[in-house]
Image (cartoon, rainbow, N blue to C red):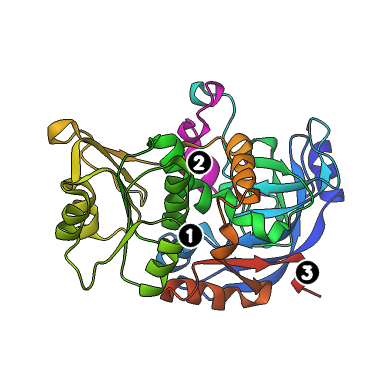
Amino acid sequence: MRKAARDNEQAQTIRAAVLRHRGGPLSIETIEMEGPQDDEVLVRIAASGICHTDISYVNEWYDASEGPLILGHEGAGIVERAGKNVKGFRRGDHVVLSYQSCGACGACRSGRPADCRDLYELNFGFRRPGGGNAYLRSGVKGHFFGQSSFATHTLATVRNLVKVKKDLPLELLAPLGCGLQTGAGTVMNSLAVKAGKSIAVFGTGSVGLAAIMAARIVGAAPIVGIDILPKRLKLARELGATHTIDSRREDVATRIRDITGSGVDYSVEGTGNDEMFRLSMELLNPGGTAALLTGASGPGRLPGGRKALSIIQGDAVPQLFIPQLISFYRKGLFPLDRLVKFYDFKQINKAIADSMRGSTIKPVLRISSSLP
């Protein structure tokens, strides 16, 4: 009771975008949130990327009995307060927020947090890691991916915080916490693509473009980008694709075989389209590997020693991989600024709509600076 009373004494008023109806719109509301528990960190959110997973929740929210929700899982901000058991973070630190993990299971202890035993519950359970809900008297649930960053403030833990230097704008770094980490990590960590190996990337949204940039960094060749939007295919070529295919106008299988002489050594499938899903595996060379990013799982082992892997977060350890991506950005190798478009927080529904129609690759919400 004493601990709960202390949390309530530290409660503060925040502003958050709340999902109350399937399909939206999200409404920006004033909510009371408890202060950080002993192992939590209070972060003032400067910016948050909007990810396909957020949009899927808005449009496909299947369990309204959960009550209204606060989404957002590509946050970046500034630490305002840390619980007494928190080490390594203090007021004023700049941080990028990523996915949550327990830190105690075998996978976490061996450096594989993306395989955490409690990954689903911690990221999609809409409760604190230890249970309970920090949002007071509103019926609203948050803690999405351990953050719910569509808000002016959030609670996180050291497991999903990455400290970053203060010389780069947080609004630029926000998308690193999920989508860009997933795309680049799939190429560099999950597939461990080697120089000179061929790769096809199905879908050139933010995740696919991050995969293409990572493929260029590791020296893959050829790098083939597949999409239906000419504007995105043009950007894919500028960011590292050696070839592009418009799947509405060209036969993907024929073009890939023309480009490579056979098939590809690796494929990354991020479209969720049934035909592209099939081709991502059928067009593999013997011994090749397909990475499936849309939650679908392939048959695992395929003929000719081929493999299909379902990838989560690019098998990245955020505290190690996000600084690596920032280093690549500083060197001009990972120009993530080419992908983003900024929106004020109050424009969140427009940002979602623009992303869905394909006119914006990676929308990023300016949060703290755009509210009175």
Q: Is residue 22 visible?
A: yes
Q: Residue at x 64, y 60 (%)?
A: 48
Residue 260 image point, x, y percent: 21, 49
Q: Are marks 1 and 3 in contact (CB under 8 Å)?
A: no
Query: As shown in the figure, which amino acid type bears the numbered disc 3?
Result: Ser
Span shown in magenta: 108-133
Check the picture and name the quadrant holding the C terminus: bottom right
Q: Is residue 205 magenta?
A: no
Q: Which residue is mark 2?
A: 121
Q: Residue at x 38, y 37 (%)?
A: 193
Query: As shown in the figure, which amino acid type bears the numbered disc 2?
Result: Glu
Q: Residue at x 42, y 76 (%)?
A: 357
Helix, strand, or loop for circle 3? Answer: helix
Local crowd size for mark 2, using a 10 Å CA cut-off: few (<14), some (14–19), many (≥20) = some
Residue 184 image point, x, y percent: 48, 46
Q: Which residue is mark 3?
A: 369
Q: Which residue is mark 1?
A: 65
Query: As shown in the figure, which amino acid type bears the numbered disc 1?
Result: Ser
